Every structure is written in structure tokens, then in C-alpha cells.
Image (spheres, grey):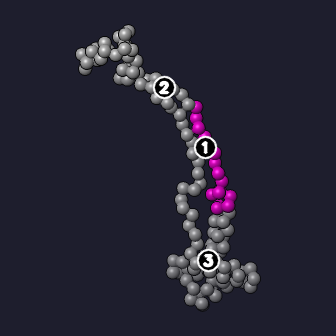
Amino acid sequence: MLISREISRRALPWSRFGYYPLWEVSSHLEFSITLSSNDLVPEQKYSKKQEIVHNLIVYLHEVEGLGYRKISYKLNEWGIKTVRGKKWFNTSVHSVLKRRNQRDSRIENQRKINYPIETGKFSLVHKPFF
């Protein structure tokens, strides 16, 4: 390797001083990029059954004025099961209403925020090629 390096140094026009800088130094560009996103998981839509049950619960609660326990009794009487195929309880009726509101506010207030891309300083770095 030393012999071929010596021969190529003599053969190249820029090696008249016996030194070619690219043999010992490697140059590259360094910088950093910071990305932020709330959209890493695909948005999951409610199924048609979930929409229908949610609208039914909202109707029974707001228009008919029924409480969570009475709504759960009615849903069980009508043979409507939860999404997981279970029996309705007052807590599960409350959760349907609460979680839907939480989901909608999370999508509106957090998921749709656009964050700027932050780019760090660019620098040209020369490092020894050892």
C-alpha cells in the first residue's frame, strides 16, 4: 500500500508537494433535525354499531332524561351487547359517553396540531482518516 501510494503521489499533478489531503482527512457535513408529530398511529373510526349505540345512549340520556343505570337496563332488555359482547352496566354506559367526548377533544386539540421542523446548525467537519 505504501508503494502504490508513493507511485500515485508522483503521478498526480496536485501531489507536487508530496501530500494529497484526501488520503488522510475525511470531510462531511453534520447537522441535526428534530421532528414532532401526534399523527404516528392511524386514526381509528367508530364502527357503525358503535355509532348507533352511542347515538342511542345520547338520545336516552339527553332527550329521555334517563340515568346510566336505567339506560343499561334498557339496553340489556333489548338484547344489545357491548362491543366486546358483554352485558351493559351503568359504568359502561358512562364510559361510552365520557370516552367519546375525550376522544373527540383529543383529536381536535392534540392530534391536529402542526409542529414546525427544527434544523440544527450546519457544520463542515474534517476528521482524520485513521
Dots 2, 1 in contact, CB < 8 A: no
How far apart marks 2 and 1 lie (CA) works out to 23 Å
Residue drawn at (54%, 61%) of the image: 42
How far apart marks 2 and 3 lie (CA) works out to 58 Å
Amino acid type at mark 3: Glu
Say if the magenta span includes residue 115: yes
Residue drawn at (63%, 65%) of the image: 103
Q: Please report whichever mark, 2 or 3, sits nearer to the chain's N-terminal start.
A: 3
Tally of numbered tags: 3
Say if the magenta span includes residue 112: yes
Closer to the camera in the image, 18 or 83: 18
Closer to the camera in the image, 32 or 28: 28
Secondary structure, mark 3, is helix
Chain part drawn in magenta: 106-121
Q: Residue furthest bottom?
A: 77
Q: Which residue is mark 3?
A: 51
Image quarter hosting the N terminus: top left
